[in-house]
Amino acid sequence: MTEHHMTEHQRHRTAPGAAPDSPSPHVPLPLAGVTVVSLEQAVAAPFATRQLADFGARVIKIERPDGGDFARRYDVSVHGQSSYFVWLNRSKESLTLDVKTAEGRAVLEELLARADVLVQNLGPGAAARLGLDASSLADRHPRVIPCTISGYGTDGPWADRKAYDLLVQCETGLVSLTGSPDQMAKAGISVADIAAGMYAYTGILTALYRRATTGSVSAVEVSLFEALAEWMGSPAYYTRYGGRQPARVGAQHATIAPYGPFTTAEDQTVLLAIQNEREWHAFCRIVLDDPTLTEDHRFATNSARVAHRDALNGVIADRFAALDTGTVLALLAKAGIANARLNSVAHFLDHPVLTGRDRWRTVATPGGDIGALLPPVTLTDLDPVMNPVPALGEHTDTILRSLGRTDTAIAALRADGVI
């Protein structure tokens, strides 16, 4: 979102240099009082913990002293900072700590004694070596809810295998479904990481609710592979029981037609989506101006239209090529057909829905203020936390002092490379 598109309300909610908005003091946030300790990196775990921080949880992000979360250095596009990192890490406290040292482990244990949740997405086997696996943690800190995010699960034949988003997209078959008939393509965002992060978030909330209502503590485990496998449900069923997998058809829908992009006389792209036979009849009558198409056996049902997609697309393409964009959109609206224009990311940033619904806020980062979208979940009468993105180790001294460390002790830890 560019500065000139921000409303006065948006500009002044968090003035540069001022403390970010806080929720109403009269309405405590639902996760206020919950403390989360997170040994996190990359995308999946930080995405989960940011959702918790958005609604009031205190998230203590433990980072390596020698550079911290490697996602900090993915790119330098946001005031010299990583676009991933500023997206995923607002409202957290950054503590640099070498948990492989005895002194670092002692600090971690003190934090866990006061925590409600431990989140970690360390490499295969690392949590167990540190005594942070679910069973070991239960012996020392029985109230702490452990959440493990792995690639392919903590047991099974691939438990020791590294996993990254693109690899998981490939292993689940997603990449075989995306792209054009001639070339496959990965999804343009980290869907495996985001899926795992969302299931970790909901799993933690479920475990917190269970602990609050029954006193029982559940360990939470999510793998990138199984999270994305859930999202593959529709093509999985289609393939298993239909005898073949959905075709790779670019921006079209693999199993519904017509559903996809078409070009107008002005060389602009309009996407449309037909969901049922009533809409198909209205589309033929009003948009295509040819109601007889509904009687064509090739187009009589959705399955028939998918089977004869090329012929159908040719009919629609010819009609749209003769109409300007405004006319196409007006006819689609008259027929009650869902549609969209093909936006770039820049167009999305200035989308009228985001502006009209006042979804942008200002968040401070070490490199300067940035625009940030509110969380997609809106809770009545509650303002989410939109606090700064932390600098590496920004809260180290404050956290250690809260644990009783003196300035001399903190200086010694720093000199020894523990923090």
Image (tube, rainbow, N blue to C red):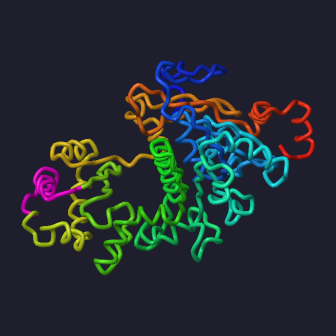
Report which quarter residue 219 is drawn in: bottom right
| Furthest-bottom residue in this view | 243
138 versus 371 height, above or below? below
Q: Could you say where residue 172 lies in the image, as x and y percent from the top left?
A: 48, 70
Q: Could you say where residue 189 lies in the image, as x and y percent from the top left?
A: 52, 55
Question: In this orientation, which residue lies closer to the viewer: 275 or 77?
Answer: 275
Q: Is residue 267 magenta?
A: no
Question: In this orientation, which residue lies closer to the viewer: 247 or 265?
Answer: 247
Question: Magenta residues, as a range?
Answer: 274-293
Left or right for 145, reference 95:
left
Question: In this orientation, which residue lies closer to the viewer: 419 or 73?
Answer: 419
Left or right for 61, reference 414:
left
195 versus 313 height, above or below? above
Residue ID at (54%, 62%): 223
Q: Is residue 277 magenta?
A: yes
Report which quarter residue 14 is drawn in: top right
Residue ID at (24%, 54%): 320
46 versus 193 height, above or below? above
Q: Main secondary structure of the magenta part?
A: helix
Left or right for 329, reference 397:
left
